């Protein structure tokens, strides 16, 4: 099983800026510009809710078996990642038609 597949089957706890701990499902993992990003879905959100917001975070590896999620601090990088994700969504929508 690849590392990405392992990540996709897991749940993680993320600490928001205000100190709140939120359990999230790893919705998807993407490689973009030589980095790994995770789309996280807070579990308090209904999966079928179209207004549910995914959280995009960078996954940083530490050693062979450890890693952590961090906010994307660079606004330009965050925008590029979001645009890339949108192109993936658009491609999936076209395939469904």
Image: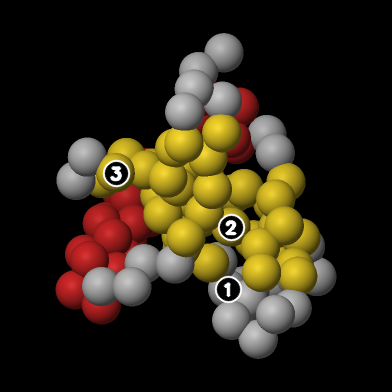
Horizontal side, residue 33 vs residue 10: left or right: left
Horizontal side, residue 95 vs residue 33: left or right: right
Q: Is residue 6 visible?
A: yes
**Marks 3 and 2: which is nearer the front?**
3
Q: Position of residue 5 (x, y in %)?
A: 56, 26
Q: Residue at x 34, y 57 (%)?
A: 85
Residue, far bottom: 18
Earlier-in-chain disc, 3 versus 2 = 3
Residue bearing mark 2: 40
Horizontal side, residue 93 vs residue 13: left or right: left
**Marks 1 and 3: which is nearer the front?**
3
Residue bearing mark 1: 53
The residue lying toward the viewer, choosing from 44 and 64, is 64
Q: Residue at x 29, y 44 (%)?
A: 35
Quadrant in the picture for residue 72: bottom left
Earlier-in-chain disc, 1 versus 3 = 3
Horizontal side, residue 19 vs residue 89: left or right: right
Residue bearing mark 3: 35
């Amino acid at each position: 099983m690849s590392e990405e597949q392992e990540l996709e089957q897991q749940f993680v706890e993320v600490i928001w800026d205000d100190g709140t701990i939120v359990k999230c499902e790893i919705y998807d993992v993407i490689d973009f510009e030589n980095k790994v990003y995770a789309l996280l879905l807070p579990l308090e959100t209904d999966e079928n809710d179209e207004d549910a917001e995914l959280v995009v975070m960078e996954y940083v590896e530490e050693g062979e078996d450890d890693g952590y999620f961090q906010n994307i601090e660079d606004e330009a990088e965050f925008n590029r990642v979001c645009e890339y994700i949108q192109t993936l969504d658009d491609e999936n929508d076209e395939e469904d038609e």
